[in-house]
Image (cartoon, rainbow, N blue to C red):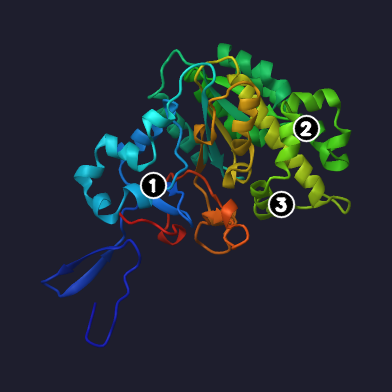
Amino acid sequence: MIGAATTTVLPANAAFFSSEKEGKIEIRQAIRPYAYHVDSTIPPSLLPISSARQERSVLKQLGKGLGTSKKEITGNRLNLNNIANKGVFGSINLVKSALGINQEDLKRKGLGYASFVALGVPMESTTEDINLVKDLVSTMLSGRAKNVATAMGLYFAPLSTQSALTSFAQSGDVSSVVEALTQAGVSQATIELYEPLLQFAKASKLDLVAMSPELEDIQTVRSSGLQNLDAGRRSEYVADSEGFIQLTTDPKFKLYSSRSLLKDFIPLDSKDSSASFFAERILVHEAGATALARYTKDKPEAFVTYVAPISDVRYVGGSNGRLPRVCNYLGKDLVTEESVTTILCNPKAPETLAAGFRLRLEIGTAPDNLDYQSKISDYLWFSTMPKVNMIPRLMNS
């Protein structure tokens, strides 16, 4: 109620109306979108995907292999007036344009092209998170040609389980793949959590791709360094050895390492160090990117979705950031950063390295590193309506 001596501050995104009968302003919770495009402004801003029709359009375009533009779109093609014009924004063509999807620029043909969608899930994932992944991938597949190689990558599956995953995709014998994963050191909790996703992949006729180094190799690198990893095993995990080494000197990667990757370091014992943790994580990320790239090597226009913890794909510095380089090395010369889309599923503020309640959208805000600024992802997607205090720099439609 607003009186002469009082002021009411309306919460952001609140819908309200005036009741003439009672002379009151009643505040109602707004219906906030479940999905947001992270625009490449400086700093990044969020563009709501405000209808189910628009969500389906975005996901189907990804399924068609069109990727995601990394260019800023808000300043060039959107303003508050045309966003509010539902009749215009509701058209499929403008949705594609507004979200940076340019078919002429991005669509590629032939053996040299592939596209990828990284689906980041919370470290402490639940069935709700896995169900969201299934729903997103299912919609992507509805826009996919049936005669094109399509796969799902599994971050937790060691390369030694690849034959079991392939057999499962063909036969559906879940007991064999569970046994192989267990023997390779995958925890029972992880297997149980992801078994519905395995069943979904089988039902959707997706190939399955193991992405992880063997557990003992991860432990070796963590305790003794990359130099003590068996040379044969190392070549399995790292195809582009020169690029793998050079990446560590790249200024943008250095920013990612210091502002994101190393933030997750927790010592295993008194001898453990951040350098050991760094070596472990870059091997895991490179092995994942290499496994996915090798899957697409002889498959024209292959489409691969993969699931990984948010910490491994945020700020596009993990396997997702490595994919274009590794693909190019293996001959997929039409794969660019726009061929790789990153979606964070049900992210919470701490997983984006935010200090408060709001999600953090970027790293690299100081004058000396602004040129290397990296946004959190291409999209944020939620199972339920996110709290208003989580969503920063929202372009309100």
Which label sits on residue 215? 2
Image vertical order of residue 244 relative to residue 86, above or below: above
Total number of numbered discs in the rendering: 3
Horizontal and vertical percent position of residue 202: 52, 19
The N terminus, quarter of image:
bottom left
Which label sits on residue 73? 1
| Among numbered discs 1 and 2, the one appearing first in the sequence | 1
| Nearer to the camera, 278 or 346 | 278
Tag 2: amino acid: Leu
Q: Secondary structure at mark 2?
A: helix
| Among numbered discs 3 and 1, the one appearing first in the sequence | 1
- Which of labels 2 and 3 is toward the front? 3
Q: Residue at x 23, y 79 (%)?
A: 2
Q: CA distance from mark 2 to mark 3?
A: 20 Å
Horizontal and vertical percent position of residue 82: 25, 50
Per the image, the residue denoted by label 3 is 262
Tag 1: amino acid: Ile
- Which of labels 1 and 2 is toward the front? 1
Kindly give the residue lying farthest to the bottom in the view shown: 5
Q: Are marks 1 and 2 in contact (CB under 8 Å)?
A: no
359 relative position to 36: left or right: right
Image vertical order of residue 269 relative to residue 189, above or below: below
Q: CA distance from mark 3 to mark 1?
A: 31 Å
124 relative position to 200: left or right: right
